[in-house]
Amino acid sequence: MIFTTTNSTTFITEFEEILGRGKMDMEHVSSIVGNIINEIKTDKNSALKQHIAKFDKWTPESDADLKVDTKYMEEAYNNLDNDLKSALHLAHDRIRVYHEKQKPKSWFDDEPNGTILGQRVTPVDSAGLYIPGGKAAYPSSLLMNVIPAQVAGVENIVVCTPTPENEINDLLLAACHLCGVENLYKVGGASAIAAMAYGTETIPKVDVITGPGNIFVATAKKMVYGEVNIDMIAGPSEIGILADDSANANHLAIDLLSQAEHDEMASSILITPSQELADAVKIEIEKWLPELSREVIARKSIEERGAIIVTKTMEEAIHLMDQIAPEHLEVATVSPFELLPLIKHAGAIFLGHNSPEAIGDYVAGPNHTLPTGGTAKFYSPLGVENFMKKTSIISFSKKGINEIGEACALIANTEGLTAHEQSVRVRLDK
């Protein structure tokens, strides 16, 4: 763990290391991923089965084995513990309500001369959703990807998830049933991304691919971008915390570990002007680690990718955190809303002592698929707009084109585009 202050002579070097946390060695895996994509494009289902046998250690006997029968989803849902079922419904409903409010509207503007300009917003025809299933299963990610696609109005939704040893998480199946998913495929990694991008005999080609994954998935999404749209290039999970003396060190420690337990490559960063709080949090982390079911993963993450920085002021802390632009940002201070206008870059911001990042992962409502590695400076959380597209609407009246057509023709003439110029001039009154 980096434990430092902004007064330290080594701080600049240490901070540069933190800023570089999101770098993924895509170049190292690009040739592997490229081969996987080409094999799927060429051999389709045949290649899929070979990849599943190689990476997930089971061999589909037929094309039908690639798809999960909806009866298993219903069975998993019916067998859920009542409390867990209620929790799943709560998450589903809150996520849907939040995303309903995101839906953009079409609009039209009538000018006095009869010209009509506008924007029509429509859903894509099909979406492919990737749900991780390697080191852990994430039914919550299923909800976070399916629901905004459904709110957008996408008609054809395809879900792919890896199934090591041909095993699939029951809660994921139950979540699929709750969401009404009909097309769930037992395909993971770069193979799944390629299958959804180019299509196979079983898996249809889609228009947009969303969802998190490992470096192979991220690299594959980057490579197929242009053939399809994607949400973002997501890396390991991360949390940033801004805190003052009013924060509870025990709470902050477990909040930092809530991201560390995701992945050895996850980043957990606390920035505070309080040396006393920084010292206390470091102690509390060590107390919590032995209590975690994923202690080995969390410990490696904290040791290799964790950081606690002590600043001179809260303003300095905010400035540093903005450069980091974390996926998740907790503001654990006396008056968090007063600091909100000063914060520019974060995927999701959690304000106040009772707003842990973990509640955003499941039941708060906003999407938990967020930009990582500093990309919150230009990417947004996954949302309804990822599954929609905008079309410009233009309708000129005779009076309207007469009013501005000459200016258009003049610009076209200056650019040397005669046909452009004349296509306007032939419509103008002489």
Image: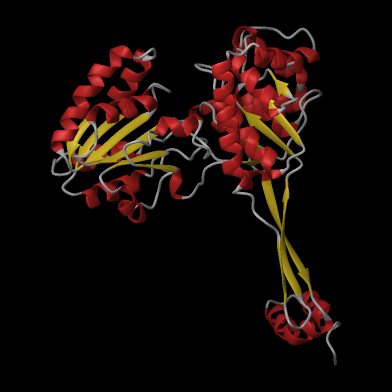
Q: Quadrant of residue 307?
A: top left
Looking at the rendered image, the quarter that the N terminus falls into is: top left
Labels in figure, total: 0
Relative to residue 162, is residue 262 drawn left or right? left
Q: Quadrant of the C terminus?
A: bottom right
**For residue 357, side relative to residue 287 (left or right):** right
| Color encoding of the figure | secondary structure
* Residue 394, horizontal then vertical, whole percent: 76, 69
- Whether residue 216 is visible, yes or no, is yes
Q: Is residue 161 visible?
A: no
Left or right of 411, for residue 367? left
Q: Is residue 190 above or below residue 166?
A: below
Q: Is residue 313 above or below residue 428?
A: above
Image quadrant in which you'd find residue 203 = top right
Tell me where residue 330 sits by quadrant.
top left
Q: Residue 345: image x %, image y %?
A: 40, 49
Residue 348 horizontal/vertical position (percent): 44, 42
The structure residue drawn at horizontal position 81% and vertical position 24%, both measured from the top left corner, is 201
- Please, which residue is most extreme toward the bottom here? 430
Residue at 29% of width from left, 16% of height from top?
289
Q: Give left or right: position of 254 versus 131.
A: left
Q: Position of residue 253 (x, y in %)?
A: 28, 27
Q: Nearer the viewer, residue 74 or 219?
A: 74
